[in-house]
Amino acid sequence: MNKTLTSLSRKIREDERRHPEATGAFSNLLEHIAIAAKIISREVNKAGLVDLTGATGETNVQGEEVKKLDEYANETLIAVLRQSGYLAGLASEEEEDVISVEDPHPNSKYIVLFDPLDGSSNIDANVSVGTIFSILKKSRVSDKAELEDFLRPGYEQVAAGYVVYGSSTMLVYTTGNGVHGFTLDASIGEFLLSHPNIKTPEKGKIFSINMGNLSRFDEGTSSYIKYLTSENRAEGRPYTLRYIGSLVSDFHRNLLYGGIFMYPADSNATNGKLRLLYEASPLAFIVEQAGGKASTGFKDILDVEPTELHQRVPLFIGSRQDVEEAEAFVQGKLNFTEEDLNDSRLIPDDAELQ
């Protein structure tokens, strides 16, 4: 088969050449993230053989049980990224405070935030897990990054991406110019371009949500789920529920096939469970570059101004039309009641979605 394969390093360098002012620092940083992903992938694939399953007995800053692979992935990313050069600071979902970089290069201007192993509670069951990362430019002229450099809205990101450790290891990223996916060929140790210019469908047929929390959902979300699952939907057959419980995996599937992932706030709370800076914001940047949308239900995720390092937000993310429809339900512009189950029409017309 005659097929030209593009490596991640080649793609990064080709993009760099389009910017004559580039110093190579940003490219170097992306390549180091890929190195860390390869190391983590190797350990994930043999976790049951090298005593990396199970818990450490500790809890992280979120109050969650720390898995051995959480700790390994966190330490790997910190160690590799510190060696990359031109890095001013780091922040991890597993660490309470900003992580310093000793003796940063005088021209260091990038900071990285990451969730080292999303979905790690599933690792002992051999379910796909992932890494999420976000890259920002330092907001101030100084050698070291401070907290305020990290508390920035998502639209200021210069790059974001994730890695899925599944049946194959795949790295997906954007620098604000489309979304590209690379699959790791372990035989040569390279990420190869397998999914160029990913575009998510405008509307899907899948919804992803933890239905175990149904009794705690707000009224608008509950109404939206009734609408999606009704046999009498004028728009066609009911949506299919697909929920892995690993955000990266659920997001990746819906990005390719279309649909919506939801993690709303509890009915008695304004904040959700997912972290703005480590999960919601980078994935929002990716999905918008792919033609989708991400929202709190009331506001675009990329416009949320963070006030703390581990801030949580509700998240509705996926195909643009699906997210806009979900917003209409959450905001009370649309409603689907028991009476509607016997009617094939929603009472408000589509104009209310605008």
Image (cartoon, grey):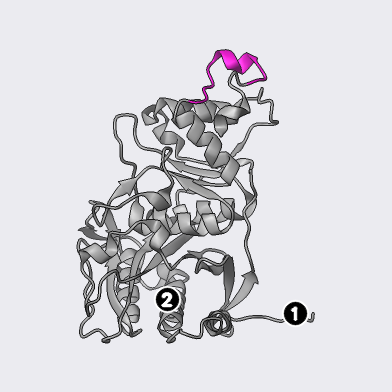
Q: Residue at x 58, y 68 (%)?
A: 181
Q: Is residue 265 visible?
A: yes
Q: Are marks 2 and 1 in contact (CB under 8 Å)?
A: no
Residue 191 locus on image (x, y percent):
56, 77
Report the span colored magenta: 333-345
CA distance separating discs 2 and 1: 26 Å
Quarter that holds the C terminus: top right
Residue designated by label 1: 3
Q: Is residue 316 above or below residue 20?
A: above
Kind of residue indicated by mark 2: Ile
Residue farthest right in this picture: 1
Q: Is residue 126 visible?
A: no
Q: Is residue 18 above or below residue 59?
A: below
Q: Residues within 10 Å of mark 2 (few under 14, many from 20)?
A: many
Residue 210, picture quadrant: top left
Residue 326 locus on image (x, y percent):
51, 35
Which element is circle 1 on? Answer: loop
Of 192 and 107, nearer the camera is: 107
Residue 309 locus on image (x, y percent):
25, 57
Q: Is residue 221 magenta?
A: no
- Mark 2 or 1, nearer chain start: 1
Residue designated by label 2: 33
